[in-house]
Amino acid sequence: MNVIEISEKLGTDEQCIAYLEGRRWPNGVRCMTCGGDKISRIETTSQNKVKAARRLYQCLEPSCKQQFSVTSGTLFHDSHLPLHKWFLAMALITQAKKGMSAKQLQRHLGIKSYQTAWYLGHRIRKAMEEKGGDPLMGIVEVDETHISGKYDKRRKREPWQTTIVAGMVERGGRVRTKKIPTASKQVLVGMVQENVHPDSTVMTDELAAYKSLSSVVAHHGVVNHRAEEWVRGEVHTNTIEGAWSLLKRGIVGSFHKISVKHLDRYLAEFDFRFNNRKNATIFDLGVSQLAAKAPMPYRELIGKPAEEPF
């Protein structure tokens, strides 16, 4: 759905709750605690004009009696934003080819606090994360790029310390990108082994770390960029270069700068949009994943990042 359709079909609390209920429980509401399907619907009344009435479910199993809402235990949990604005934010982000900054979301949705808009955007990106999945197949292009920007002596890093992102893309299919510690043979070849089917053909540039790829995939084609060779028949990396172009233009044009700490979520956003570029139900998929994933508390978002599993 686009923004106009959302405004028409999901403009009220009742419509939003019914839609989210259908995405979360397509076979009917079930208790979050015991899984029971005997549920009572409760609508609380509010004595305070500031606070809206709440719509709750209560499990009717005698040993449970758990109360919960349509947003309990999801990425929507503990949000004070109306669902209508959540759905508009999902539509805006899935349709913005180069992404949408928190400041843009704040303006478009009439959100008072920049902090709230920033938190909203990151929870949507969290929903877009796709772990695992079927291996990439066919002709797969592999490349790496640097995201650190220009060196500035005021920053706490040396000129050679940059953030590297590796990517793999099926021609005409899916892309996967990931922040990596170094563009070494061990890291890059290991990444291909984990994500690419061994019967595939892999295309790379002339980086020495890729030389042993012929031992883990059926075929390995190399294009020599240093010699200004960009295409040789089917051998090229133009598809993954196009994905890097979208990512970097998004960072420069929409976000202006991003934190390395949150980089993987931004990568997940661009991967999700690229992988669902032909999916007419990308909005529905995004909302379903918001409802399927566990909450991400604000303190977790701004806290010290966990050790990288490199």
Image (cartoon, grey):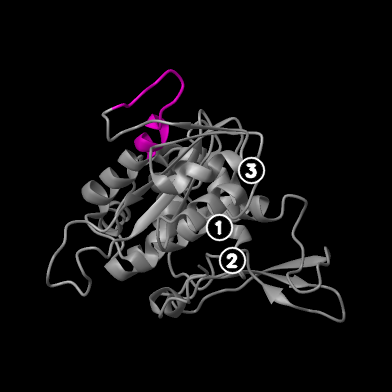
| Mark 1: amino acid | Leu
Can you name the residue that lies furthest to the left here?
A: 153
* Residue at the image position 63 percent from the left and 68 percent from the top: 69
Instruction: Using a 10 Å C-alpha cutoff, classify the residue at mark 2 as few (fewer than 14 neighbours), some (14 to 19) or many (20 or more).
Output: some
| Mark 2: amino acid | Thr
- In three-dimensional space, the C-alpha distance between marks 3 and 2, rounded to whole angstroms, equals 28 Å
* Residue at the image position 66 percent from the left and 55 percent from the top: 24
- In three-dimensional space, the C-alpha distance between marks 3 and 1, rounded to whole angstroms, equals 24 Å
The residue to which callout 1 is attached is 290
Prevailing SS of the magenta stretch: loop
The residue to which callout 3 is attached is 135
Q: Which comes before the other along the chain, label 3 or label 1?
A: 3
Magenta-highlighted residues: 229-243
Instruction: Using a 10 Å C-alpha cutoff, classify the residue at mark 3 as few (fewer than 14 neighbours), some (14 to 19) or many (20 or more).
Output: some
Q: Are marks 1 and 2 in contact (CB under 8 Å)?
A: yes
The residue to which callout 2 is attached is 74
Q: Is residue 15 visible?
A: no
Instruction: Using a 10 Å C-alpha cutoff, classify the residue at mark 1 as few (fewer than 14 neighbours), some (14 to 19) or many (20 or more).
Output: many
